[in-house]
Image (tube, rainbow, N blue to C red):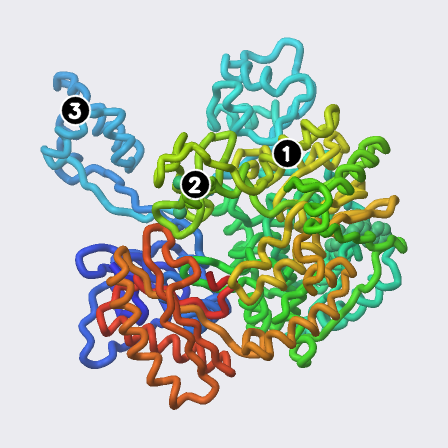
Amino acid sequence: MAAIRNTLTYLVPDSFSVQPGQRVQVPLATRKATGIVLRAGSTLPPGIQARPILRLLDTEPVLTPELMELGLWIADYYVAPIGEVFRAMLPLRSATRRARSVRLSALGQQKLQEISQPEQEPAGPAGDLLAYLATRGSASVQVLRKKFSEAFLEALKEKWLVVDEVERERTQRQVYAVRLAGPVPEKPLRLSPVAKRILEALGTEGTAGDHRELLQTARADLAALKKLSASGLIELDPSKKSSLPGDTWAEGGTPLVLTPGQSTVLDDLTKQLESGQFQTVLLHGITGSGKTEIYLRLIARCLEIGRTALMLVPEISLTPSVQAQFLARFSSQVALLHSALSENERHEEWWRIRRGEAKVVLGTRSAIFAPLSNLGVVIIDEEHDTSYKQEETPRYHGRDVAVVRARLAGALAVLGSATPSLESYWNACEGKYRLAALPERVEGRKLADVEIIDMRQEFRETHTQVPVSRRLKQEIETQLSKRQQTMILLNRRGYSWFLLCRSCGQTQRCVNCSISLTYHRREHRLICHYCGYSAPVPARCPNCDSQHLYYVGEGTEKVEKKFAELFPGARVARLDRDVARRQGQFRHILDEFRRGQIDLLVGTQLIAKGHDFPGVTLVGVVSADIGLGLPDFRSAERTFQLLTQAAGRAGRGESPGRVLVQTFYPDHYAIRMAAEQNYEAFFHKEMRFRRMMHYPPVTALANVIAHGAKLDQAAQVAKHVGNFLIPLEKNTEGLKILGPTPAPLAKLEGRFRIQFLIKCTSRARLSTILQRLADYTDQQGIPQRSLMIDMDPANIM
Ligand code: ADP
Ligand code: ZN
Ligand code: ZN
């Protein structure tokens, strides 16, 4: 069933009162669906036949007027069905649940009267059931079924019972911290065995941070715990369970003394905040300039003036230090929202924010929808990061949504980065955003020196294709002898990039995608990095039966192994998506690296993101320029950002840092300017290219992909799209349509893809055209899943 783009009208039964923003269950064709009340009126529009609402899912609106407006904006601008937008904004179960409650009927009352006469025979289980209900008033079906089984069914058949449908508020699963109230008396007053087990489990320290773990150890339930607490032996503290980062990160409780540069920027931001006017500030602060401290101060000020604050980071599991600092400064006022939370935890955090208990939210992309009221500041850290773009419907960009949300709330938006996206820096140049700059590192620390190693030269001199140049190898040896830490950046995970047949030149490709499979040594399989398909490693070429199969290119797995061999005695570890998938492993390695227990850390771009490891004095970039060969207009920007961020990890402590960049394109401007860490120079150079080619930010861009399980199905969809778009091009000013052509990834996840790139001088006009395209294709009966519409795409592959 396709998602609905328009809205529907329902009747509100007299017994309900509904408000905009409330969730309701409604009949939709033959099934039930969840809806959000947009507007409630007292009369039905003429000619409309409306069915009644079935039930209310929450007792109060879950969306504030501000968030509803934001949702409507997203649905419009990104051409997404409003229902899917609201679903993305509310990752929640309903707050009420439907329960069936049982009480005695008149017949049942009568029966109970009869059987309780003294001369009657004992009434057996059925009598017990009636007596049970008479004393309690009502009970749930589940409880009665469990307690009385047969007798319950009999009583139903005899019509002694009435079953009512009731709405129950879902009980919030509260987590308690537990501690002994005082010394346990020598001879405890008649303790039950379970109480004894609980006291025992509390151990010598007499405390437990999470009652659920305690109960597990003690083989006890919550009722037993509460009973013990009522007896005064222990105390329960409603606590907020947080995955508090370990001691390694436990700094950041006391504010630092600001540098003059930080002070100037903070003063300016504070003035904007206090003005109570919407405003967007781009904070361009080089790596290690101390942006985090500014964010913390600004948020503290925001709380002081009685408003709430929201900060987005790219990937929260990767930033334990930021989490630790937030918790240290704002303790229980902080709510964390990210993808590693369980459904229950997210539900709890969401309601803490909704109830106003949490006033500071730290989270990833979808945290932009946190139900904070009276929002004063929204901060987007590492605003250039591509993880802010959602790659499924609704395809919104978290940074751009943040700016809109700030506008609706009359709040200050702060976008921070050492390598701002071209879009944001352009907006600052155009005067749309205010620009604030931190051009120096804290404590007068120098940016790392960057040296470029020409790998073509290396090959000419050594005649071997090796991942690590002689120079980098020698530098790592020096590091090890000085006991200093090194990070090695690579941008491919796995062991080798692909398996190539030397006889026929074929590589092993994914059956679902037009992409080569990557060899993973741990699994000993060939894996697709796009769809996850995996295949065994063939002994002979499936195409020509030759035995000459070669592993080409180095991934993180191979370099990790190679380093362990090259530098015996060195402690080598690896961080990439494969490691991150293993629960707790990622954090563990970050902790160890932080404590100096790892000498060499090999990883993908994940290690270049925002981390602050003061002990790192050398960063080696083994390969970061493969991206330059991709047919995406942002490839130079991505490469520049990656290299600059990677370089920014070196020399953040007392000792200065160095960076070695190995490349096959030593003259490419993205590489050279990243080596100079000269953002402005890169910006101006890259803008010339964007202007010449009519690419964002100078024009608006949309990526429209028609796809299908068969090529001719995709072509059929593309034909309809073309029928709509191509005539428009002639009579719309500033509109340019490229396509239809096979997408760079011509097949993905088993579907063939045909692409249109649409450029338009006006973003608003482009968005309107896309909305009309969606209406048109709906009318043509094209299933929504056959057409991807991506406004402001982050990648056009
Ligand atoms: P950025 O995010 O701008 O790259 P961070 O906020 O991570 O930089 O700060 C870099 C380092 O400098 C951190 O270790 C931080 O604790 C430290 N730092 C920040 N401000 C100050 C200050 N005013 N005085 C001393 N150290 C500071
Ligand atoms: Zn072959
Ligand atoms: Zn695939």
- Whether residue 75 can be seen here: no
Q: Nearer the viewer, mark 3 or mark 1?
A: 1
CA gap, disc 2 and disc 3: 75 Å
Q: Are circles 2 and 3 on residues that touch, CB within 8 Å? A: no
Q: Is residue 586 placed above or below 751 in the rendered structure?
A: above
Q: Would you say 455 lies left or right of 634 here?
A: right
> Which residue type carries mark 1?
Glu
Disc sitting over residue 150 in the figure: 3
Name the residue at 15% across, 40% down.
Answer: 106
In this rendered view, identify the residue nearer to me: 703 or 568: 568
| Residue 173 in sight here | yes
Sequence-first tag of 2 and 1:
2
Q: Is residue 255 left or right of residue 57?
A: right
Residue labelled 2 has its Cβ within 8 Å of some atom of ligand 2 = yes
In the image, what residue type sits under mark 2?
Ser
Distance from disc 3 to disc 1, alpha carbons, whole Å, reads 64 Å
Q: Position of residue 459 (x, y in %)?
A: 68, 46
Tag 3 secondary structure: helix
Q: Residues within 10 Å of mark 3 (few under 14, many from 20)?
A: few
Regarding mark 2 in the picture, which secondary structure is present there? loop
